[in-house]
Image (cartoon, rainbow, N blue to C red):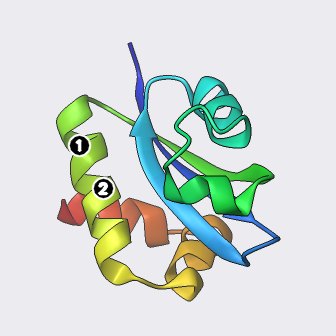
């Protein structure tokens, strides 16, 4: 079963949300239907998938999720998607 780091974007909040899952479409549906009513993401509905990153295992996915969150930067998240080589460089570090 593949593990993914998924990054959602809310135009309403102009913010990203980073998480780990084995099914990004299911998680998007859960976020957009307020499946967890007390969750932060309820405020940003509707969310769209900005980026998914396939990982080799759950450990790599959780490390990558923590790394992206620690960066606390929408510019960094945009670079992950738009600048060739950034993602590979990050994956090599974790």
Residue 71 vertical placement versus 43 (above, below): below
Does dot 1 land on a helix, a strand or a loop? helix
Residue 4 vertical placement versus 91 (above, below): above
- Which residue lies under the disc numbered 1? 60
Residue 63 in the image: x percent, y percent? 21, 53
Residue 44 in the image: x percent, y percent? 71, 62
Residue at 81%, 52% (x, y): give it. Answer: 46
Asked whether 57 or 17 is in front, the reply is 17
**Residue 60 located left or right of residue 28:** left
Q: Rate crowding at label 2 as few (under 14), some (14 to 19) or many (20 or more) other CA atoms within 10 Å.
A: many
Asked whether 38 or 87 is in front, the reply is 38
Measure the C-alpha gap from mark 1 to mark 2: 6 Å
Label annotation for residue 2 = none
**Residue 10 located left or right of residue 76:** right
Residue 60 vertical placement versus 50 (above, below): above
Residue 57 in the image: x percent, y percent? 26, 29
Label total for image? 2
Which quadrant of the figure contains the N terminus?
A: top left
Residue at 40%, 41% (x, y): give it. Answer: 20
Residue at 40%, 82% (x, y): give it. Answer: 72
- Which residue lies under the disc numbered 2? 64
Residue 28 vertical placement versus 66 (above, below): above
The reply to whether dot 1 and dot 2 touch (C-beta < 8 Å) is yes
Residue at 29%, 76% (x, y): give it. Answer: 70
Does dot 2 land on a helix, a strand or a loop? helix
Which quadrant of the figure contains the C terminus?
A: bottom left
Q: Rate crowding at label 1 as few (under 14), some (14 to 19) or many (20 or more) other CA atoms within 10 Å.
A: some
The picture quadrant where one finds residue 83 is bottom right
């Amino acid at each position: 079963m593949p593990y993914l780091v998924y990054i959602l974007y809310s135009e309403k909040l102009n913010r990203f949300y980073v998480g780990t899952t084995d099914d990004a479409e299911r998680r998007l549906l859960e976020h957009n239907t307020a499946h967890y009513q007390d969750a932060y993401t309820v405020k940003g509905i509707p969310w769209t998938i900005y980026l998914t990153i396939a990982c080799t295992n759950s450990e790599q996915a959780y490390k990558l999720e923590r790394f992206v969150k620690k960066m606390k930067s929408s510019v960094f998240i945009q670079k992950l998607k738009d600048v060739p080589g950034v993602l590979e460089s990050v994956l090599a570090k974790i």
